[in-house]
Amino acid sequence: MSNEKEHVTEHFLLKLIREELEQNPFGRKMCTRFPPEPNGYLHIGSAYAIHTNYTAAQTFNGTFHLRFDDTNPLKEDIEYVNAIQADIKWLGYDPGEHIYYGSDYSDEIYNAALHLIRQGKAYVCDLTPEELNEYRGTLTEPGRISPYRNRPVEENLEIVARMKKGDFPAASKVVRAKIDMASPNLSMRDPVIYRILFAEHYRTKHDWCIYPMYDFAHPIQDAIEGITYSLCSIEFKNNRPLYEWVLQELGFPEPPRQREFGRLNLTGVVTSKRFLRPMVEGGYVDGWDDPRLPTIQGLRRRGFTSESIRSFVEAIGSIRTESTVDISLLDHCLRQDLKEKAVRVMGVLRPLKVVITNYPEAEAEFLSIENNSENEALGKREVPFSRTIYIERDDFMEQPPPDFHRLSPNVEVRLKGAYFIRCEEVIKDCETGEISELHCTYDPLTKSGTGFTGRKVKGTIHWVSAEHAVKVDVNLYDKMLLDQESLKENNGNWTERINPDSLVTIKDALIEPSVKGSLPEQKFQFFRHGYFCIDNKYRNNDRLVFNRIVPLKDTWSKK
């Protein structure tokens, strides 16, 4: 096809669609959709599904729809609708004007059920939920025919009308498609297509008390919107015959086609709402946007960029079967995105006081330091230097091993962008014996940028001026659950597996003053500590709060 976009790498799913489109099966434009249920927030797995549908439409100059599968009023809320829209736009998959709601098709879906009843293809069943499950059969045993399967058409129509009016209790009756109780595919054994629910819907309020099941509503919604391809993950493959049966029995011309791609799993990440919802509602995390969660808003608040997430799902490509991807790939994509974008600043998380005894007491100078050695376009900044500074406590050892190349007694190191200093004296607390400060001397001839070519030092450490430093709070994150890889999402006591160190907050960390006036979500690289983002939700009074997105690669690999 001559109008295909060439910038998208073609994978098996695109090849399949291309081959089918070459047969001209549709008299309309290529169209895909992403149909989330608004009962929670999108997560990193959702981004993969969105990307697959969006890029398929873009490849063949089609359109991409966002349609909310809002046919279950018990768990859905406008909060989730708004969050999903915001996330999709932030990710860069904006559907524009093509935002739809399954609840807007309530009349059409109800009329479709009536049509099936009139054609003898559906019936009202009075079996209880327990009986329905029992009658369904197993993978090795066929199902049993419902005693209500052969109800007369007029009786079925009358009961359905009364169900719609609210004349029967919830779960007392359902509408089932009449297909094949002996089918080896359990989804074809007279599946339920309507059920009774008494709950206020966030859009239709109390207009309805019967709601369609997803497998019935979804193909109808696709056909109404002119979707050509329903692209979904592999676990829906067994539902494809039902999808096609509904469209065929309702007589839709040029029906949409369901095609599947592999389900994405990530090491150490649980994305099931059965897990996420109780974590949020039980107060174990700070809302759906907690930076420890794999939700899109959690990742954004932590500091991941939309570009890094898109790069991540693009790197995965389209997979045919269920696959597991190492979450470190997402960290890598973030580092690649920020390595030439982020300004590199000096931040001391666990300060140790250093007094430079031969530096003038009342003096301070401003040193010009490059913002990013890999991107000269980011320019330089002025960093204050004074007699009293702070260094990282881990950057000093009184009795260092041979491979320690930082500061120790009578050893010289370079201060980043500044001077050589030598430790002359170690001051300790008389009661605890803990090191409280260091007394050092500096060599004024070793100032960075002056072309000094004398003696060499093995180590360079970062620092901040005590007089000018900005106090901030810093959040460091680890996995939310211990033994997370073996966690079964639908059983087990996950509360016993919560990692007590999933969030460590460092109070009174010291950052160079160039960060003053920075905005929420602004990213920085802290020397040796990793990439950080200003929290978009909280400030500690007027104090900035920084979230560590990821450590630097060399430090991460040693964890």
Image (cartoon, grey):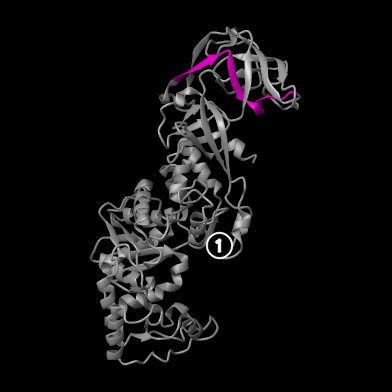
Please provide percent x and percent y for residue 141. Answer: 53, 85
Q: Is residue 551 above or below residue 448?
A: below
Q: Is residue 536 magenta?
A: no
As drawn, the residue found furthest toward the left would be 27
Quarter of the figure with the C terminus: top right
Q: Which residues are magenta?
A: 381-398
Q: Is residue 298 visible?
A: yes
Q: What is the count of numbered marks?
A: 1
Magenta span main SS: strand
Q: Is residue 157 above or below residue 36?
A: below
Please provide percent x and percent y for residue 108. Answer: 25, 73
In this rendering, position of residue 441 left or right of residue 165 = right
Circle 1 SS class: loop
- Residue 172: quadrant of the picture: bottom left
In this rendering, position of residue 426 left or right of residue 549 = right
Q: Is residue 119 above or below residue 262?
A: below
Q: Is residue 213 above or below residue 149?
A: above
Residue underneath mark 1:
489
Residue at 34%, 73% (x, y): give it: 211
Q: Is residue 23 visible?
A: no
Please provide percent x and percent y for residue 194. Answer: 36, 77
Mark 1: which amino acid? Glu
